[in-house]
Amino acid sequence: MDNLQHLSAQSPLYAKRDLLKNGSGQAVTLSLESEPNLITLRGDSADKSFLAAVKNLIGSPLPVKPCSSQEKGEVAALWMGPDEWLIIANETDSLKPLPEMALALAEYHCALVDISNSKVMLSLAGPSSRDVLSKGCSIDFYSNKWRKGHCVNSLYARCDVTIWQRATRDHYAILVRNSFSDYVSDYLLDAALEYNVA
Amino acid sequence: MSVNRLPSSGRINRDVPIRLRFNGTYYLGYEGDTLASALLANDIHLVARSMKYARPRGIMTAGPEEPNAIMQINVSNRSEPNPKATETYLHPGLIAASVNAWPSLRYDARRLSGIAQRLMSAGFYYKTMFGSSTLWQKVFEPIIRRSAGLGKAPSDPDPDVYDHMHRHVDLMVVGAGPAGLAAARDAALSGARVALVDALPEFGGSLLSQNRTIDKISGMDWVSGVTSELETCDTALLLPNTTAIGYFDQNYIIAIERRLDHKGEASTPANVRERLWHIRADKVILATGSHERPLVFSDNDRPGIMLAGAVQSYVNRFAVLPGKSAILFANNDAAYEAALDFKKAGGDLVAVIDPRQEPQGPLVEELFATGTRLLSGHVVTATLGVNRFKGVNAAPWNGHAITGKEERFEADILMMSGGWSPAVHLFSQASGKLRYDAEICAFVPDIYGQKECSVIGAANGDFSLNEALRAGSRESIKAATAYGKPTRKTARRYAVEEPDTGVSEACWQVPAQNPADQGKLKQFVDFQNDTTAADIALAKREGFDSVEHMKRYTLSGFGTDQGKTGNINALAILARQTASSIEETGTTTFRPPYTPVSFGAVAGRFVGPLTDPVRTTPMHEAHVKAGALFENVGQWNRPWYYARAGEDMDAAVRRECKAVRKGVGMLDVSTLGKIDIQGPDAREFINRLYTNSVTNLKPGNCRYGIMCGEDGMVLDDGVITCLDDTHFVTTTTTAGAAHVLSHMEDYLETEWPDLKVYCTSITEEWATIAINGPKARDVMERLNADEDWSAKAFPFLTHKEVQIGGVMARIFRISFTGELAYEINIPARYGLALWSHVANVGQEWDITPYGTEAMHILRAEKGYILVGQDTDGSQTPQDLGLNWIVSTNKPDFIGMRSHARPDTVRSDRKQLVGLMTESPEFVLEEGAQIVENPDAPTPIPMVGHVTSSYWSEHLGHSIALALIQGGLGRKGEQLHSFSLGNWHKVTIVDPIFYDIEGAHRDG
Amino acid sequence: MLKIKCPYCGDRDETEFSYGGEAHIERPDSPSEVSDEAWGAYLFGRPNKKGLMRERWFHVHGCRRWFNLLRDTSNHTIIGSYTALEKPSIAELKKESRKGGAK
């Protein structure tokens, strides 16, 4: 009997679900994105054939320019390093199962690792987003490098984060590892208070 | 209106009067007043007692260089020690008190006893502490404790909120005086990103205090115009009330913005009191101005003796005439302008005493024309008054000695000026080198320490307004061209009306009437630390003749004002004492911060619950519910033990240990690092990383592994699992996870780039529960009845993927307790549900969650090491008795060569052994030292130390692990350990205390 | 705090990096054939010189790449950076740095 019981999944920020559901304020909103599928892909960015094979497989091209991303439909690929990408799929079925993907890339030296359970994705939006980010991160958010799709790995409040611009302006996704997500969201909510005062 | 307040003018808001309380009495000031200007408006000069001699002191300056007017400021629930009255802006509810006065400001006990005066010469601390220790403890320390230090540290936590903000700019301009405004102007108009910071609440700098005309309008109208222009630039960050306190490499500037103090608002996380700005600039322009310096003459510290420029500030900026009558003692023409402003405001200028033999220039002429008595070639030889300045004696001199008779002059205040020193602090902090400019008698910037930096205006020794504006505009156009779309190509030409200030002549020290260090008259150099010219002479006599030694011996420049006024006088006097030039003597090192900064601002939001990330596992909620107490392991919060009602820690841990040995326990091991290693060369890579071989490790099998550094010392340990021929998973210790991954990437990227391997951290992907105990198999059968969990079908050190509760889990037969164990890895989102599920199905066997304390005991009973507890980075695997895990067949692995170094093969290395105490109940202290003969003369040679020590409930006696010299060959030997205040006999035993045969492994 | 140029990500604050000591110290191909003295020198012998030094840095909180930096240890001037497997001459790095212009 017992083994028929189905385990249910729970986000690390479950306890904050109400706080993060409707955003947190007028000038800046912080919310929890629906949990996307995340895959770390490692491979040779100089291998054109590999890049083409991946594009064929996931729909989106792989970005080769540092700190950039590519997006096609429900699938996005973020540059994480010269031989590393983070593939983000919003719908479960927008990607093939991992073993099938691995099979499709079997002829290349590459690695696919499912990290969907490792991180949460927060959404930060509003005209003061850049200041909220600047309170915890030394990246230049006012630089003209920041356009839709720009992404960086850096530290926010001393925790590893990926910050990814989602719209023409004032909308960012923040990916953070589970165990730091409570702290990072606390810090973000605190940083946003100044701008959400009526 | 207050007695010294001028009827009109000034930058104060007369529509907003503010009541302040100082030392118990209420006074009236206005919005825009500093505490200092409000007190002076009420004719309060005596505001402090000096640190060492308890001499009465008054307000001397009008800025951050103030050495005397140091306050304890109380506002509602906040008490802040040591703000300067000259930097504290009035706001409702301000309560200020003098520091360092006991029992009261007017009657100071130390002053009356005179004890300090007679005893505390320079170097007092050193001499006394190295002398009689009794005298120090009984006599001096209590006196010094009462008098030393300044304000009282608050006893409650700081109620205020502070934060940090990062910003990158093209151009950072420090100082919004005329030079800084001109420097920011064209750059900002070009669209370049510009930050302009100024310590004052209002831009304008020297123009706030000096009457000037720029482009035919008044200086302050010009300031308003430029400020309005800057405010229209979206890319300009304008920060008044902001002091740049540190200038670091690659144009990194730390500035502190005081956002609420001048308004008296309470701080909240939405409205912080102070903000620490981290500004990274491409180009930096320092327009930090200059500081006026005092003259060194006898009793130059009486309340009412002020810097001439400060008086000019009080008159023009604050509409305060600090006295009805004044005497000027100055060696430069700029001070004449200050005296003339004092006179124009209605003050009575009694006399001007000028050490120069033949002062000349338009300002001298102008002063002469007012009929004021001008004594050229004269110096002040003594001052009158105790709690308040009353007058001076002046006498002629020839530049070295007094040459004539003294004459007495009386007035309310003495305006003094020894010239101006460029504020080169930030320039110097950032490795800039200075040069002595004899013409202006000051150090000026010479060689820049940073690229793309320029110092302009008074900070560069260019005291003329015209030159400051021209330099500002020139630099601004350069920045505009580099970073923006310049609106003009050439520097602006500002039409400036300013007096010609001529040439000043150095006057570093007025001849003392009595030999140095004798008599009552004192010539102060550093007012805050009561350092006198005689102290500097004493330092030199006693051999402390380098400037850095002199500073430390006399404490000159060590105050909260960092000697902004007096440093140059100190080193000029030292130069004369050592018969060298000022250039040769040099300056002491300028270090950040430029002005004191509150601890709160440094901490920012990293306080309270945001102090540091607290990492928790997916099962955290269940641990809290089960009453767990937590232990920090790195940033992780791990359950330490789960106390049930009425249990103390010992009882809970005993119960948990017993459950694992007799029944079944469950432990959250999600924090262990997990690394996914893939690629055709993965096996080879692991062979090179770990001491043992995985050449024959088959898919589905696990192996314990040790990892060493190149030096052969144990770095980390864990379990290596082969998923398939090109895919492995390894675990690391909780604390070592990040480092091990970096270590792997280091070798792959730099040493062995030919190896085709990728490593990915999967620590957070999987939640892990270790189920340990003789009943573990029963629990597993309940979790999935379709799987064969027997030792035969699922042997020790193997791995399987099994469905649990509809989710695919990775299960490992590995044990850190010696009991039958299964470690279930499940995708992290299911961790909490799995924990509850296991706890639920395990009820039948009373499954017991256990914490890290029980885990430590259980592993120690088996002699399993804990990297970081039983090792400290100086143990080889051989030292730990782990020879069996060090391959001798591999051609190489990291650390292998070092295991053959002469030092690592020594037989007397500290080696890991077990210890049994003579008295079985006694638990040794961890870290306790071990000796062979406790009766040997001290220092007794130490042969080792205890690394782990516990009470073993299961064995019924205490157990300990220890590192002992040559320990592996000393089994059975009796040694002695000093623990908890006594000697204890201990016997060296095998470190495996429980189940040496491994009989319990399979249940 | 230094501003360090990651060869991939560009200028970042020092907080994103960790230091890895002197660069271009080659691990002997066959350590077992190396004398104790030579091995000891490889492990511990570092001149720690004042002036221009090639050093290893790890962009641990960024792209997680190890790379090399040419830095003047006497005044923190950073001349340039390059990837782990390159070794451009000092002149080349200086030239590259000048090309960067006002930055």
Image (cartoon, coloured by chain):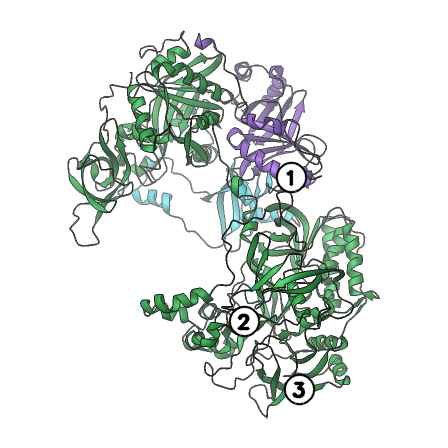
Chain colours: A purple, B green, C cyan
Q: Which amino acid does the dot numbered 3 rest on?
A: Ser
Q: Which residue is mark 1?
A: A193
The reply to whether discs 3 and 2 touch (Cβ–Cβ < 8 Å) is no
Task: Using the image, name the chain to which the residue with label 2 belongs.
Answer: B
Q: Using the numbered discs, state the Cα–Cα distance from disc 3 to disc 2 in whole angstroms.
A: 27 Å
Crowd tier of the residue under label 2, counting other residues whose Cα lies within 10 Å: few below 14, some 14–19, many 20 or above: many
Q: Of callouts 3 and 2, which one flags the residue occurring earlier in the amino acid sequence?
A: 3
Position of residue B319 in the picture relative to residue A75 (left or right): right
Crowd tier of the residue under label 1, counting other residues whose Cα lies within 10 Å: few below 14, some 14–19, many 20 or above: some
Choose mark 2 or mark 1, whichever is in front: 1
**Mark on residue B527?**
2
The reply to whether discs 2 and 1 touch (Cβ–Cβ < 8 Å) is no
Q: Quarter-wise, where is residue B416 in the image?
A: bottom right
Q: In this view of the protein, can residue B144 be seen by the observer? A: yes
Q: Which amino acid does the dot numbered 1 rest on?
A: Leu
Task: Using the image, name the chain to which the residue with label 3 belongs.
Answer: B
Q: Nearer the viewer, residue B646 or B303?
A: B646
Q: Which residue is mark 3?
A: B376
Q: Position of residue B424 (x, y in %)?
A: 60, 64
Q: Position of residue B250 (x, y in %)?
A: 59, 51
- Pick the quarter of the image with the C terminus of chain B: top left
Instruction: Answer yes or no: are tags 3 and 2 on the same subunit.
Output: yes
B935 in relation to B82, above or below = above
Q: Secondary structure at mark 2?
A: loop
Q: Position of residue B639 (x, y in %)?
A: 41, 30
Choose mark 3 or mark 2, whichever is in front: 2
